[in-house]
Each structure stands twice: as structure tokens, then as C-alpha cells.
Amino acid sequence: MFLHLQDEGYNGNKLSGRARGKAATLIYRFKSIMQKVDLSVTLCSIPLRNPTILASGILGTTRALLKRVAENGAGALTIKSISTEPREGHNNPTVITFEAGMLNAVGYSNPGMHAAAREFSDLQEIGVPVIASVIGTEHEDFMRVVEGLSKIQFSAIEIPLSCPHTPGFGLLSGQGTPESTFKITSLVRKATKLPIFVKLSPNSPELCTAAKAAEDAGADAITAVNSMGPGMAINIDAQRPVLGFKVGGVTGDALRPIAVRCVYDLYKAVKIPIIGVGGISTGRHAIEMMMAGASVIGIGTGVYYRGIDVFRKVSEEMALWLQKNGYNTFRDIIGVVHD
Ligand SMILES: Cc1cc2nc3c(=O)[nH]c(=O)nc-3n(C[C@H](O)[C@H](O)[C@H](O)COP(=O)(O)O)c2cc1C
């Protein structure tokens, strides 16, 4: 499907007759494949046109950006995490790349819940479900942010208990222990009727116990995983760590095998669906994550590596793989590697 247009007579401005014919045939063939393979899915009663979700912290900062990601094929979108008060985050540089992914220490920069409520006041025009991501330092903060955003038409609430590089939040304040996970999830459960997704850390030795605690407290799905680490990159010429915060979360290719293993373990530990996140940038990666047990998948770093239309690309590649391997729907491959 991903024809090399240069090989087919593309001269940079227009297609030759032969290339146009070939492109039309391929588009026709692709459309008929997409018709046969069903990529739609219902996640906790939320209908999605395909199983790709924009991960939190990546392009989810404004309504206009959300709209662009939706136009580029995402099945659902997660906004950047929101706290009660505005936060500046860590000093630059906050995001760098390395050979196998990214290191980031953004530090949860966000405009706070009141500004966020204004920014996301009208989500109708986005056209796909939007998931809020809420954070806090105190357990009750999560509930306050949910209440602060309650007038906005979000489709679900995600609560990350797993950030590895922001003091006061996530791993650095023990929010991902089974006990805290249970308390925070219970408070959010009281504050909203929307589906709750609890986002856990690949670092956690108590990953499955924490997921079970979330399930017991009323979570509707587990998002697995957040960035791993923290890790560090050093500029040897300057003889200093590169990131402003010195250390940051590892994402992208380097995270994928860890994320796949986490999802594999979680699939046996909980009954609620798993949103598999970590290093997915191709259809094959998405299928691998689903075979481990994910019902849908999130994409973050993949946006950097393959562009904003990575969601469309991943969906198309999934559809082609499924069709080639005799499946009408990806639902048949979820968890197939389990005995
Ligand atoms: C620059 C950047 C910012 C992020 N910010 C957030 C955030 O605000 N909240 C959150 O829950 N996760 C955040 N994450 C983690 C991602 O949502 C995702 O869990 C992680 O990047 C792994 O997926 P990936 O390998 O596809 O990027 C961030 C990741 C990156 C790279």
C-alpha cells in the first residue's frame, strides 16, 4: 500500500499517468481491505472507530491540536495531564531523543483546571472521544480536578499514578503503591460516573497488585504503561546531563519490550480492559501489544517518529496484517499468546 511514488513516476509536483493509475488501483484495493477488516471497538461503553488513542502529554494541550490529531485518524484522544493549579514544569531542555526513543522530563507543565475547563469547553467539534488526564499531589486533588472539569464533555478520566520524574507526583510520591492506588481511585470513583482509566508504571514491582487495587476501587480500565526510568543522557563535551531536570522518563522503542511484558502480566491479573502504551509506532507493534492482552493501544513517541498521521498509518497497517492473516477483526488476536 505504501507505494514509493518516486519509483512510479512522481516528479515532486504531479503524478505521471502510470503512477496515477497505480495509485488509484492501490487506493481501491486498500479501501476494499478496510471494508473487510473491522477496526471499530467499544472501550468501557465508549465507541471508537479504531483502537488507536493519543497518549497523554503528546499534542493534547489545546482543542485545535486535538482536532488535528482526530483528523489524522486517532480513535480517541487523551489530553495533557491537568492539576488544580497552573504549573510551569521543569526547565528546558525537557525532551530529547536518543537512538531508541525519547527521554522527557516535562514536569507536568499545564494551565491548571480552570484554564483547561475553558480550553476544552467545546469538545463536540473534535468528532472522537476525548479522555481527561488528572493529576494531584494530595489524594483529594485528583477528585478536585475531576470536579473542576465536570462540565466538560470528556468521555473518560485517566489518572496517572506513575510519572517517574516530577517531585510530588506519581512514583516520586508513592502514588502507584497498591494502597495509594486504591485510595485515589476510590476518591475519583465517588467524584464521577465516567469510566476511569488508571495509568501505571512499568517500574513498579507491584504492578499487578496495584492494578488489582484499581480494579477493586472501581477503575474501568488500566493504562499500561507510563514512561520508564528515569534515565539520563550526558553531553560529554559540555560534561553535563542534557535534560534540564538531569533525569527523565524513557519512552519509544526502548520501552516497548517492557510495556509488552507489563501488559502480558496484567492480562492475567485483572478482568478490566488494558490500554497498551509504550513504543508503538507501527501496525505490527500494535498487534504485538494486543497479542499480549491490550484491548486498545496508545501512541505517544510514535507521533514524533512517524508524524501526526501515525494513527492512520498504524490502523492501515493493522488492517493489512489482519487481512493477510485471515482475521476480520483484531478482537480475535487479543491475548492469543497466553496459554
Ligand atoms: C513529552 C512527553 C510528555 C508526556 N506527558 C505525560 C503526561 O502529561 N501525562 C501522562 O500520563 N503521561 C505522559 N507521558 C507519557 C505518555 O503518555 C506515554 O505513557 C509514554 O510516552 C509511553 O508511550 P510511547 O512510548 O508511545 O511514548 C509523556 C510522554 C512524553 C514523551
Image (tube, helix red, strand yellow):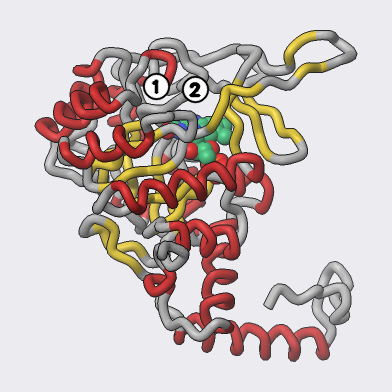
Neighbor class of circle 1 (other Cα within 10 Å; few <14, some 14-19, many 20+) is many
From what the image shows, is residue 54 above or below residue 32? above
What type is the residue that disc 2 sits on? Pro
Residue at horizontal 64 percent and vertical 27 percent from the top = 95
> Residue 90 got which mark?
none
For the question of whether residue 115 can be seen, the reply is no
User: Residue 187's quadrant in the figure?
Assistant: top left
Residue at horizontal 36 percent and vertical 17 percent from the top = 174
What type is the residue that disc 1 sits on? Gly
Which residue, given by chain and number where applicable, does mark 2 sit on? 164
- In the image, taking residue 103 as reference, residue 165 lies left or right, namely left
For the question of whether residue 141 can be seen, the reply is yes
User: Residue 328's quadrant in the figure?
Assistant: bottom left
Looking at marks 1 and 2 on the same chain, the residue that comes earlier in the sequence is marked by 2
> Residue 170 got which mark?
1
Residue at horizontal 29 percent and vertical 58 percent from the top = 43
- In the image, taking residue 22 as reference, residue 218 lies left or right, namely left
- Residue 145 vs residue 250, the one in the foreground: 250
Mark 2 residue's CB less than 8 Å from ligand 1: no
- In the image, taking residue 250 as reference, residue 86 lies left or right, namely left
Q: Where is residue 141 in the image (x, y as percent from the top left)?
A: 24, 18
Q: Do the residues labelled 1 and 2 touch (CB within 8 Å)?
A: yes
Neighbor class of circle 2 (other Cα within 10 Å; few <14, some 14-19, many 20+) is many
Gap between marks 1 and 2, in whole Å?
A: 7 Å
From what the image shows, is residue 273 above or below residue 324? above
Q: In which quarter of the image is the N terminus?
A: bottom right
Q: Element under label 2?
A: loop
Q: Where is residue 164 in the image (x, y as percent from the top left)?
A: 49, 22
